[in-house]
Image (tube, rainbow, N blue to C red):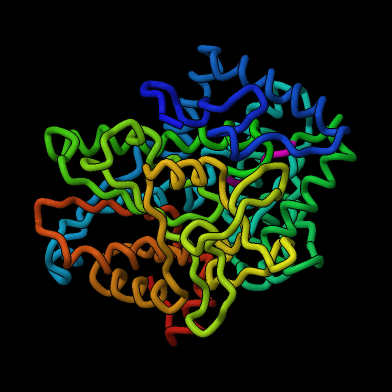
């Protein structure tokens, strides 16, 4: 498949919702076909309405805070030598992560559908936190499905959700992490879709959820494009955009405006969770060459066992601890537009330590994986190369994990 320039990649699917004829689709129960069709029609109508876009842009400016900063990491650049390293500080957004963009769009759609309740999933807790924030702002009831393992390791975000009035539904099935939270959330929606709106927290799931999420997070690259032109007078000729990849929402948002560019000018680099160095478990279906499977209503590369069943994953980062990935990223891998690699838990922790010691920023463990790749490749490049890392989440949620592994945590 060739990418068509000038059309968002989220819209380059066939009539059945497949990208490249292979990834995505709508593998859903019969009971969900009408709700998904209704949501698809609603979104298509709203995304072309001037008043809807005006309200969204106003919320991005006055509630989220746009644009988020674009800063040079001078100390890190000097320490490593080679490429110049910058960061897009998406963690500046209200609530501390990129998940706020998708949450706002879903809350707006929920109101348009005249529903009073919204449900979602969460792993790192940021998506649940953002949905609880916007639900409170829009006067909606909110139910967040979260694995019990993640509830234990992401206490700060759980506290924030409850403070905002959301109900956290503990999920004890399977690995007790994000994959199971998404499954339970979808099951709940099957039984309550007439009165509840569902927002999936990443660029995964049936086609419409991929489109809504990508439509929302594309705000990141719209801002970045302007900021690059302001900083350099043009889009740099040797640019590398590095982003962590779990489901892939922040990466798509970070890359959206740049996918059309020649890859010799702009390289897109996705960094998955390689897991602990001494474990065979990981959450890196793209870079570890997993096979195509079906999960949460879509065909994509999935971590599977020898029988083709979804396998367990392991990562220090709750937000990346997911056995599949967006069909968009599967396509970008297959056509060679993006390069995917992984960082281990240990590499992410070391990157966090280096970055926080040298710079006045504090990325969560998700973007710490992206910083690990930047630290790895920057010394091999000359200073005409520009690296931009999407610092898409704040470390506060990970303070207990960081303290456990590094001995202390300070901001």
Which stretch appears magenta? 198-202
Q: Which residue is drawn at 72% across and 61% down?
A: 308
Work out which quarter of the rendered image holds the C terminus and state it.
bottom left
Q: In which quarter of the image is residue 360?
A: bottom left
Q: Residue furthest left?
A: 383
Query: Would you place residue 377 above or below residue 211 in this image?
Result: below
| Residue 371 is one of the magenta-drawn residues | no
- Dominant secondary structure, magenta: loop
Q: Is residue 411 left or right of residue 50?
A: left
Q: Nearer the viewer, residue 173 or 110?
A: 173
Q: Residue furthest bottom?
A: 407
Residue 355 spot, x, y in % from top left: 29, 69
Q: Does residue 249 appear anywhere in the picture?
A: no
Residue 232 spot, x, y in % from top left: 13, 39
Q: Is residue 47 left or right of residue 310?
A: left
Q: Which residue is drawn at 43% across and 57% down?
A: 244
Q: Residue at x 17, y 65 (%)?
A: 380
């Amino acid at each position: 498949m060739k990418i068509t320039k000038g059309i968002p990649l989220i819209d380059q699917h066939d009539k059945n919702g497949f990208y490249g004829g292979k990834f995505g689709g709508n593998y859903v129960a019969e009971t969900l076909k009408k709700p998904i069709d209704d949501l698809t029609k609603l979104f298509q109508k709203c995304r072309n309405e001037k008043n809807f876009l005006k309200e969204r842009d106003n919320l991005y400016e006055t509630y989220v805070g746009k644009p988020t900063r674009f800063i040079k990491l001078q100390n890190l650049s000097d320490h490593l030598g080679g490429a110049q390293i910058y960061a897009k500080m998406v963690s500046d957004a209200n609530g501390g992560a990129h998940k706020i963009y998708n949450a706002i769009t879903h809350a707006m759609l929920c109101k348009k559908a005249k529903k009073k309740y919204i449900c979602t999933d969460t792993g790192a807790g940021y998506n649940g936190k953002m949905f609880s924030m916007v639900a409170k702002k829009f006067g909606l009831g909110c139910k967040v499905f979260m694995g019990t393992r993640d509830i234990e390791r992401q206490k700060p975000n759980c506290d924030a959700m409850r403070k905002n009035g959301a109900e956290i539904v503990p999920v004890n099935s399977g690995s007790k992490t994000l994959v199971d939270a998404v499954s339970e959330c979808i099951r709940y929606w099957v039984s309550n879709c007439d009165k509840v709106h569902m927002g999936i927290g990443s660029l995964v799931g049936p086609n419409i959820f991929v489109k809504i999420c990508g439509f929302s997070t594309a705000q990141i690259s719209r801002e970045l494009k302007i900021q690059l032109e302001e900083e350099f007078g043009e889009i740099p000729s040797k640019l590398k955009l590095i982003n962590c990849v779990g489901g892939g929402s922040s990466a798509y948002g970070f890359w959206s405006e740049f996918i059309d560019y020649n890859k010799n000018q702009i390289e897109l680099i996705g960094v998955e969770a390689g897991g602990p160095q001494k474990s065979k478990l990981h959450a890196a279906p793209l870079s570890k060459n997993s096979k195509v499977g079906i999960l949460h209503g879509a065909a994509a590369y999935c971590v599977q066992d020898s029988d083709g069943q979804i396998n367990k994953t392991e990562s220090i980062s709750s937000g990346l601890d997911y056995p599949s990935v967006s069909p968009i990223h599967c396509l970008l891998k297959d056509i060679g537009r993006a390069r995917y690699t992984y960082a281990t838990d240990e590499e992410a922790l070391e990157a966090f330590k280096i970055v926080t010691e040298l710079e006045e920023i504090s990325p969560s463990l998700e973007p710490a994986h992206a910083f690990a790749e930047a630290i790895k490749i920057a010394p091999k490049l000359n200073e005409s190369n520009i690296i931009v890392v999407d610092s898409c989440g704040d470390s506060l949620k990970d303070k207990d994990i960081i303290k456990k592994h590094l001995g202390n945590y300070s901001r």
